[in-house]
Amino acid sequence: MVARVGGVLLLVLLCIRGVPAINSVSPPAGGPPIPPLTDGVEIEGIHGWFANIYPWKYMPNVSTVFPVRSLWTRPNDYQSPADIVRQNAVLEEYGSGADVLQYSANPDAPDYNQWLRTYFTNGDRPFFVAYEHIYGTRLIPDNGAKDMNIPYNRIAFKNDIDAIYRKVIIPFQHRYVTYHGRAVIFLWAARAMYGDFASLLDEVRAEYPVAFIGSVGLMQLPSDAAALKNSSALDGFMEYGLYAPSYGTMTTTYFENSGKWRQIIRGFETTTGRNYLFIPTFQAAFDNSKYTEGVAPMYPVDRAEVLHHAENIKQEFGTAYDPLGPFVVFSELIEGAAVIQSQCISDTLDKRDRWVGCGTGRLDILKEYFGN
């Protein structure tokens, strides 16, 4: 099984039962020639925080964040196009500069076309894709960590990138976020791609003008040589989420490990001669207690703890981190980290030792420290 804890992966590698024949997946059949660069929106020119947004249904019975009705008019259903328009206005008001869209390239995924029905055609905000390469994929196993030495997986990964480039990046390239002319693709669990992933990333970049930013697990720094080699093949780093038994521990650990990771990046740069982005992550909380068991909720004791987290990030702009972002979970409602404008009900009111910041409490902090 694979449990996702605010972006920190607890990986128990799944047994692969019956590897499909290699010829059961074919390389892309071709199409218009791929241009050498993508004429999009350069990430280093974007001001404000990055909002990670999901195409999932809002299910109140398993959610620990409850969006206000103006942003999600249909509980137990997807957002409507009108909801997306109103949401875009909120993001603009609170200083977000770009969106990161959770996107599956698997046409069998239930939310495969949701962004086409809603987000893509109902706004003009810059965005890039958070590629869903772990759950519900065409790779094997369909859920869980992936052995990228398997030829089938390498072809399937390339097919997904081809689909993303042709169906998302090219049609919307005037809004698509790029890094030095290469379309940014976020691998939210890069460490779950094991084996020789590095050479595959090089192969893909040789065919498509893309740049891979990956989450490498900074709450527990990677140390083995294979993981570090794969990390060095990325174009940048950005954590999907942060978790520790307490919010204060999370803040301290992330702050210290970010400095250590910047030192590792300098080693990568010396070895490869390439430059790497390092974008910070802001975490408001973590609570998936209505969805799964075994992981204790993580909330700040008070608002001051969240301000301390924001101040740590801000002071490290230009040193540990590049002065971009931070990356913020905006609407992942089940894990309780979402900063979306939310309902203040009995479940979300602040308690003596738990600050939730319902309403716009979390957004107010983001606007104050990182608004564009």
Image: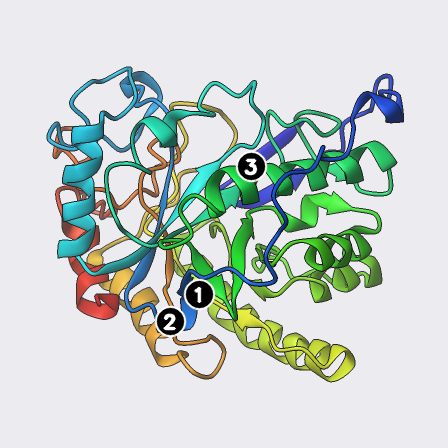
Q: Residue at x 18, y 62 (%)?
A: 367
Question: In the figure, 156 relative to 210: above or below?
Answer: above
Marks 1/3 in contact by CB < 8 Å: the verdict is no
- Image location (x, y in percent) of residue 298: 39, 45
Kindly indicate the quadrant of the structure image that contains residue 14: top right
The answer to which of 215 and 35 lies nearer the viewer is: 35
Residue 226 image offset from top left, x and y in percent: 82, 58
**Where does residue 330 sit, x and y in percent of width and height?**
31, 44
Q: Which residue is mark 1?
A: 280
What quarter of the picture does the C terminus occupy?
A: bottom left
Figure quadrant of residue 152:
top right
Q: Give the Cα distance between marks 2 and 1.
A: 7 Å
Q: 191 or 283, which lies in front?
A: 191
Proximity of marks 2 and 1: CB atoms separated by less than 8 Å: yes
Report which residue position mark 3 lands on: 132
Q: CA distance from mark 2 to mark 3?
A: 27 Å
Q: Camera-side residue: 23 or 53?
A: 23
In this rendering, which labeled residue sits more in front, label 2 or label 3?
3
Label 1 sits on what residue type? Pro
Is residue 6 among the parts visible in the rendering? Answer: no
| Among numbered discs 2 and 3, the one appearing first in the sequence | 3
How packed mark 2 is, by other alpha carbons closer than 10 Å (few <14, some 14-19, many 20 or more), is: many
Nearest to N terminus: mark 1 or mark 3: 3
Task: Kindly identify the amino acid type of the residue bearing the numbered disc 3.
Answer: Glu
Q: Amino acid at mark 2?
A: Ile
Total marks drawn?
3
Q: Position of residue 182 (x, y in %)?
A: 55, 62
Q: Residue visible at 86% across and 42% down?
A: 149
| Residue on which the image places disc 2 | 313
Question: Compared to 164, does 41 lie above or below?
Answer: below
